[in-house]
Image (cartoon, grey):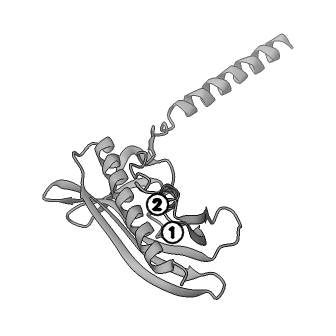
Amino acid sequence: MKTVSRLWRRMTVICILGAVSACSILPEAQVQDSYRLPMSRLLPPAAQPAPVDLALLVATPRSGHLLESQRILVIRQDNQINAYKGAQWSEPAPVLVRDRILDAFRTDGRIKSVSNDAISVKSDIELQSDLRNFHVEYRENHPIVHVQLDASLVATAVRSIIATHRFSIELPAKGEQVPDIVEAFGAATDQLAKEVVDWTLLRARPG
């Protein structure tokens, strides 16, 4: 009996060592640094703006499957699509753009009520959009951030389109390192959001 017991203990130890050995040969998960967009540098209007009696809903932009991920995309000069290794966005690109536009409307302060599609509230108009580009392009070996949004203003009550517009921002990055790229995305989305706010106020004012 003792011999059998020792044999079982030996076999158990061998199995445990075998399991540990098997785990050690599995590839380790790649460490990912997550980046949010830099804090917006948009400032409130110098003078107190006249309020606009509207409720606006900013919908999350639609996009293709590549932009729905958290990868920081790069398009090379041969049109090959890559992503920065070891780095990712804190949220998918459509969410980053939606939140930057929301921040811009709230900083501007002219529209009375601004919400997003994560909560169910009544609105007078909706800002719907397609995010066409949110990537880095290399031109003459220099990185340029490209953000493009096709926007539509929709009257909620009758589900009719009030206006459409394409916004396209291109800004060169100061360098090729990921923090330089992220900083350029921050400036580009600030400019995009500012243009979206001004256009919305121009086209959606009552009367």
Q: Nearer the viewer, residue 191 or 73?
A: 191
Residue drawn at (49%, 47%) of the image: 90
Q: Amino acid at mark 2?
A: Val
**Can you identify the residue that label 2 sits on?**
97
**Tag 2 and tag 1, C-beta contact below 8 Å:** yes
Q: Sort mark 2 into few (<14), some (14-19) or many (20+) by Cα contacts within 10 Å.
A: many
Is 55 left or right of 151, judged from the image as shown?
right
**SS for tag 2?**
helix
Residue drawn at (12%, 59%) of the image: 140
**SS for tag 1?**
loop
Q: Amino acid at mark 1?
A: Pro
Quarter of the figure that contains the N terminus: top right
Q: Sort mark 1 into few (<14), some (14-19) or many (20+) by Cα contacts within 10 Å.
A: many
**Can you identify the residue that label 1 sits on?**
61
Residue drawn at (44%, 63%) of the image: 67
Q: Residue furthest top?
A: 2
Is 123 left or right of 38, judged from the image as shown?
right
**First in sequence: mark 2 or mark 1?**
1
Q: Quadrant of residue 15?
A: top right
Query: Vertical placement of 171 versus 151: above or below?
Result: above
Q: Nearer the viewer, residue 45 or 192?
A: 45
